[in-house]
Amino acid sequence: MGVLDGISIVEIAGIGPGPFCGMLLADMGADVIVVERASGKAGDPLDMGKNAILNRGKRSLALDLKDARAIDAVLRLIDRADALIEGMRPGVMERLGLGPDICLARNPKLVYGRMTGWGQSGPLAQTAGHDLNYIALSGALWYSGEPGKPPLAPPTLVGDLGGGALYLALGLLAGILNVQRGGAGQVIDAAVVDGSANLMNLLLSLHAAGRMPFERGRGILDGPHWCGTYACADGHFVSVQALEPQFNALLFSKLGLGDDPGVRQSLRSGLLCPTAGSVGCAIRHSAAPTLGRSARGQRRLFRAGADAGRGHGASAHGRPRCLCQARWRVAGRPGAALLGHPGRRTWCGTAARRAWGGDSACGGTGRK
């Protein structure tokens, strides 16, 4: 039994953020019934079939929504539902006879969730778009990538899921809570371009405080020597984020830069400038070889992670495993062990075991 046990959701099958939102609600115990196409679209690259994790925990019903009898069946489901999720282009649900006016007239307590990229109205409402287009226009794409190179964010995470699915889920739950307190049903209009713009509030606050200029690579979070990723000798990568001064001090110490005059002056003054002349040059020129070519240096840095930040690794099958209470994150290729390849021991796996009592060459148990 989950926290949403007894809540009934009707989901009109779609792609991306709508199904993800339905999955989140099903994971929390809601009874989600997906109304799917009677027949799939041939050659659809987004049709994942039985591999669609987004369908977990849901029931499904295949209907041809061009048939009046199918529409009547959906309306009967909606009569008993607490919420509905749909991700059609604006106007499509109305033309099918499943628009919010009809549904709310039949079920005044219904929370009608709508998921689009550009919103229900406006100059782009009927324009086709995808995750990357939405976050480009909202501004959420800007800080992704290195200075002087085209911005590129992880696919779907910032827009479809962060700015879309999560905002729709929050709106639906707020609407359901309102009904349970005696309020009326309502329409939740979620748009990826709006949600991803709202996600910018922390970065825009830092910008207003003078810590995140719009010029990429000059802010406190998008390019300092102590906030970035480095290539490792085994072809994987390690990310470093020693943001606070005490973690900076430990990072510099483990890199053998603790006695550098520029570093010491930076630490004494609490300087957190990503372009701090000698400091930035020293760390870039010292950290890259240490992290990229020297196994011994990498082991030293992994041990430093116990106090410098937080770290997570993954098993051979990509499942996250906590390695230490430090702000270090190890990233690698999908399907590969982040601390060594399955079936063989590597210096990285050995370092993890020595540093944190790990249980295999591919990860560790972690300790506090």
Image (cartoon, rainbow, N blue to C red):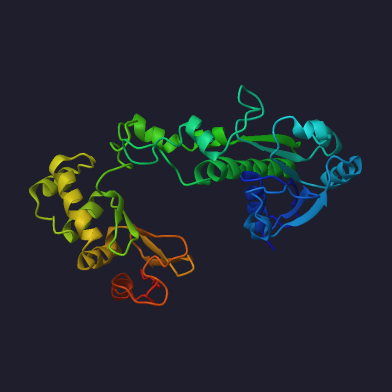
**Residue reaching furthest top?**
123
- Residue 338 vs residue 42: left or right? left
**Residue reaching furthest front?**
43
Is residue 28 visible in the rendered image? The answer is: no
**Front-most of 292 and 3?**
292
Q: Quadrant of residue 122?
A: top right
| Relative height, residue 264 to residue 125 (above, below) | below
Return the x and y of residue 308 as percentages of the image width and height. Answer: 27, 58
Return the x and y of residue 178 as percentages of the image width and height. Answer: 70, 40
Residue at x 18%, y 40% (from the top left corner): 276
Q: Quadrant of residue 363?
A: bottom left
**Residue reaching furthest right?**
69
| Relative height, residue 335 to residue 358 (above, below) | above
- Residue 232 vs residue 14: left or right? left
- Residue 301 vs residue 368: left or right? left
Return the x and y of residue 348 as percentages of the image width and height. Answer: 31, 69
Is residue 260 visible in the rendered image? The answer is: yes
**Front-most of 239 and 324?**
239
Q: How many marks?
A: 0
Q: Which quarter shows the C terminus? A: bottom left
- Residue 11 vs residue 365: left or right? right
Residue at x 18%, y 58% (from the top left corner): 255
